[in-house]
């Protein structure tokens, strides 16, 4: 007999938008234990997009990393045309508290920032060096990208605030699959400028080609995330339709007065409007300060 989501779990509240759907915090009915669930609907998707969604779910179950919460089970309700991907619970609010403190003039210690960079670069490097087949034999392998990196989905270990986990594995590929370009707080900071340009071109073209997310997009998102942790505010502070103009108005080089030059240099390189000039996750991982932080974290 097929498992029914609502018979087993109850949705507590919605946490964030994710590619193909939304992320909920849920409670298991028989023991009140908390989990998270990605609700992924495909009723309005074409056959090719449904195929990609099934591939995403397969990747979510197969891709294992200690910096990403584990997928515990997948419930497929065929009549409702929806998948529920059940994951470990990781919903602490420490990063949001950190952002509030930074806005009040109490930014996090630089060592903690470098520790978060090290862990995120580590998981992104593994992803960007992982490829998979979209179609059967003969298709060109595709590099795995996250596509949904933002402070909303980065959570700390309750036992050690220096240790983080990503709540979702975005498995981003094509932007125009019903994914909201604006994050849950209304900021466009985490979406790379080349994607915004491609989205604009897509919607004005008679033959739209969906924008493809790349590893370089993930690196822009990492830069935007680090900038927000350091300053308490998003890189793009207002809702705007004229994203390119706002982006060009950002004063460069970006300064982080309360932090060292090396951190400011990394943020500027990650937020380079030209994707070919951004460092890769492997290059960030090779930085001496990042290696030092990984050594410290390995002893915890």
Image (spheres, rainbow, N blue to C red):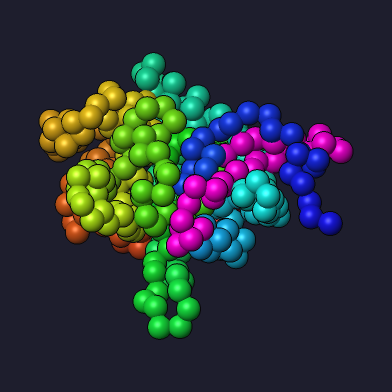
In which quarter of the view is residue 163 placed?
A: top right
Q: Quadrant of the N terminus?
A: bottom right
> Is 75 or 272 nearer to us in this picture?
75
Residue placed at 62% from the left, 49% from the top? 81
Q: Position of residue 140 (x, y in %)?
A: 37, 76
In the picture as drawn, the residue positioned furthest to the top comes out as: 104
> Is 183 or 166 nearer to us in this picture?
183
Q: Position of residue 298 (x, y in %)?
A: 55, 56
Which stretch did the figure color magenta? 23-50
Tell whether 257 sits left or right of 286.
left
Residue placed at 51% from the left, 35% from the top? 16
Queried whether the magenta region covers residue 40, the answer comes back as yes
* Residue 292 in view of the camera: no
Queried whether the magenta region covers residue 137, the answer comes back as no
Q: Position of residue 168 (x, y in %)?
A: 53, 47
Q: Position of residue 244 (x, y in %)?
A: 16, 37
Residue placed at 41% from the left, 27% from the top? 185
> Is 105 or 71 nearer to us in this picture?
71
């Amino acid at each position: 007999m097929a498992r029914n989501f609502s018979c087993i779990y109850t949705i507590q509240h919605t946490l964030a938008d994710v590619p193909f759907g939304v992320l909920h915090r849920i409670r298991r009915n028989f023991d009140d234990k908390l989990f998270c669930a990605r609700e992924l609907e495909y009723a309005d998707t074409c056959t090719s997009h449904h195929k990609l969604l099934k591939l995403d779910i397969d990747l979510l179950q197969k891709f294992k990393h200690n910096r990403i919460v584990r997928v515990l089970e997948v419930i497929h309700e065929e009549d409702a045309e929806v998948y529920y991907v059940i994951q470990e619970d990781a919903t602490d609010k420490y990063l949001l508290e950190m952002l509030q403190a930074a806005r009040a003039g109490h930014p996090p210690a630089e060592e903690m920032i470098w520790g978060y960079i090290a862990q995120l670069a580590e998981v992104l490097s593994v992803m960007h060096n992982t490829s998979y087949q979209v179609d059967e034999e003969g298709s060109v392998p595709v590099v795995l990208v996250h596509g949904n990196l933002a402070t909303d989905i980065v959570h700390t270990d309750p036992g050690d605030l220096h240790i983080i986990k990503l709540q979702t594995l975005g498995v981003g590929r094509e932007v125009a699959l019903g994914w909201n370009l604006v994050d849950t707080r209304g900021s466009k900071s985490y979406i790379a400028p080349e994607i915004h340009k491609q989205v604009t071109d897509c919607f004005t073209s008679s033959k739209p080609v969906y924008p493809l997310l790349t590893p370089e997009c993930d690196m822009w998102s990492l830069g935007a995330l680090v900038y927000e942790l350091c300053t308490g505010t998003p890189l793009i502070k207002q809702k705007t339709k004229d994203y390119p103009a706002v982006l060009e108005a950002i004063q460069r080089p970006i300064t982080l007065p309360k932090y060292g030059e090396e951190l400011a240099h990394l943020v500027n390189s990650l937020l380079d409007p030209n994707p070919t000039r951004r460092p890769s996750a492997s290059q960030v991982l090779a930085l001496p300060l990042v290696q030092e932080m990984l050594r410290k974290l390995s002893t915890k």
